[in-house]
Amino acid sequence: MQVSDLGSWGIGSEKPLIMAGPCSAETEDQLFETAKALKEINISIIRAGIWKPRTRPNNFEGVGIEGLRWAQRVKKELGVKIAIEVATPAHVFEALKHNIDIIWIGARSTANPFTVQEIANALRGMDIPVFIKNPVNPDLSLWLGAIERIANAGITKIGAIHRGFSSFQKNKYRNAPVWQIPLELKSKFPQMPMICDPSHISGVRDWIFEVSQRALDLDYDGLIIESHRDPEHAWSDAAQQLTPESLGEMLTRLKIRKSTSENPEFIDRLEDLRDQIDNIDREIFEAVAARMRIVDKIGYYKKANNVTVFQVNRWKEISDVRKQWAKALNLNEEFMEEFFKLIHDASIRRQTAIINSEDAGKNGVMESQKTDAR
Ligand code: PEP
Ligand code: MN
């Protein structure tokens, strides 16, 4: 898969790349005035939803083609670039006809390979930057598949947008970020720009700063942020949009760190600390392996005595004690609980396999003792 460097796309090379603008284009005036205020805080890529994918019907579904004409005026009079969402081949056709500079594929579309393929077919032979949002569900393959479909159509200016994932469970965020998924994507395609959409992750203005800072700390290449001249009265996503002024203020508060440093002292020290981390990780793995050997021994012992794998009292006791350990060691209790639960689940699976196996523990000879003797 060929992905060209963001610097060569002709949409700006400064990191972080900032795209901002209203969730939806509503009126010519609203789009123009918002874009003008954004230009004043040095934003040169304006986003605007023209066709809006709404979860429920009978909500505002976008102004359609008329909005593309407003966008053309904004582009001409303010000298900015315009980014819009496309969800059908007809949208692609209209976007290209109206000289839109950048398009993105929304989260709901990315989740549907038929839709992505149709968009890809409509884009064949074109040279427009395409950003692909993560699918609504946390599925790396689906995201990867969408990227591959667009790449197979010959597009090389491809970027990814992390906008969080929807969940049935109540969460602080509207779409909770799963930072690990875009990191895995990035490790597959290191040169592909990774953008964060803190607006759709947060769902409310209050969390936009912290999500943006987190993304920049993870070396994201840019941010796409919703901004409206009068957020309270926005026709869509009113709670999460920032005025251009508050966006400008927020951007100045963000700490922008370098991806790396050439300073030899820094490089030496980092290498040294990373060696230490490698050693500790190795010790963690060895400790898990040692734990599993004991888990197996207990499994054979339970099998020989016809006892169930899981004893609720024991589980309660060990999880309480581990919670106290986490606290005493100043570790995040929730994280350690999750971490330990994974280890415990794996242990239960091993013991279940042991007590159901045919030959294990036969004649009182424990498989694990044989293993130990190796
Ligand atoms: C949007 O960016 O306006 C949008 C609808 O986003 P998403 O596809 O992430 O829901
Ligand atoms: Mn929106």
Image (cartoon, grey):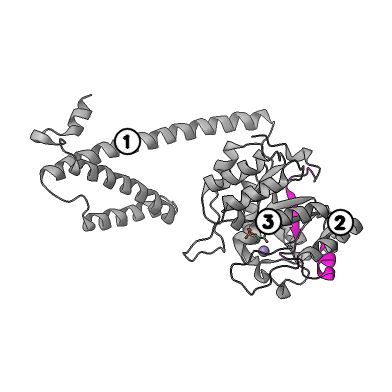
Q: Which amino acid does the dot numbered 3 rest on?
A: Thr
Q: Residues within 10 Å of mark 1 (few under 14, many from 20)?
A: few
| In the image, farthest residue toward the left | 363
Q: Which amino acid does the dot numbered 1 rest on?
A: Ala
Q: Which residue is mark 2?
A: 75
Number of the front mark, 1 or 2: 2
| In the image, farthest residue toward the right | 77
Rounded to the nearest angstrom, the CA distance separating label 1 from label 3 is 51 Å
Q: Which residue is mark 3?
A: 88
Which of the marked residues, 1 or 2, is nearer the chain's N terminus? 2
Q: Residues within 10 Å of mark 2 (few under 14, many from 20)?
A: many
Q: Which residues are magenta?
A: 12-35
Q: Is residue 364 left or right of residue 154?
A: left
- Marks 1,3: beta carbons within 8 A: no
Q: Nearer the viewer, residue 23 or 338?
A: 23
| Position of 323 relative to 10 (above/below) | below
The residue depicted at 50 percent of the width and 30 percent of the height is 275
Residue 367 position, x and y percent, is: 18, 33
For mark 3, give the secondary structure: loop
- Indicate which disc residue 289 carries: 1
Rounded to the nearest angstrom, the CA distance separating label 2 from label 3 is 23 Å
